[in-house]
Amino acid sequence: MEINDITYKIRGAIFAVYNVLGPGLLESVYELALMHELSKQGLKVERQVKIDVYYDGVLLPTDFRLDILVEDSVIIELKSVEAIKDVHHKQLLTYMRLAKKSAGILVNFNTDKITESIFRKVL
């Protein structure tokens, strides 16, 4: 499946979750609901995926995890915050680089306008 097809399905799943749950819940609730919705669409989804972080050729002893990984190719970084900040965009790009994934989606569920709170990133 192509990246564009995957991200299209992810956006649809985000809308479905938001339309049922609305804003104001904890990030963990949206994570579980989105996992369920993506699985219903037949997508391979994993949550809290551990990725290794290397510095100067040394594996750092961290427990670094991605929120959701879809089809082993798209990272979803979930937020439930008052406002998305520049650092959130940079965070997703760093996660994509570390995990060696070319696509990611940043979403903030704590909003009145979900269409303006979904950001697609490509390296």
Image (tube, helix red, strand yellow):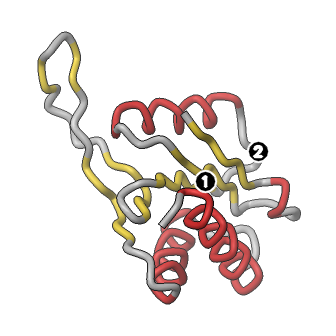
Q: Residue at x 29, y 41 (%)?
A: 64
Q: Is residue 40 above or below residue 59?
A: below
Q: Residue at x 56, y 71 (%)?
A: 30
Q: Disc 2, disc 1: CB below 8 Å?
A: no
SS state under label 1: strand
Which amino acid, by three-letter code, is at mark 1?
Lys
Q: Which mark is residue 33?
A: none
Q: Residue at x 66, y 48 (%)?
A: 120
SS state under label 2: loop
- Location of mark 2 (residue): 83
Q: Position of residue 43 (x, y in %)?
A: 44, 77
Q: Is residue 64 above or below residue 76?
A: above
Q: Residue at x 34, y 67 (%)?
A: 46
Task: Categorize mark 1 by other alpha carbons within 10 Å: few (<14), some (14-19), many (20+).
Answer: many
Q: Position of residue 14 (x, y in %)?
A: 66, 71
- Location of mark 1 (residue): 79
Q: Which residue is nearer to you in this view: 38 or 113?
A: 38
Q: Is residue 9 rendered to the left or right of residue 93? A: right
Q: Is residue 96 rendered to the left or right of residue 22? A: left
Q: Which residue is nearer to you in this view: 111 or 105?
A: 105
Which amino acid, by three-letter code, is at mark 2?
Ala
Q: Quadrant of residue 55?
A: top left
Which residue ends up furthest to the top in the rendered image? 56
The span from disc 2 to disc 1 (Cα, nearest Å) is: 9 Å
Q: Position of residue 53 (x, y in %)?
A: 24, 30
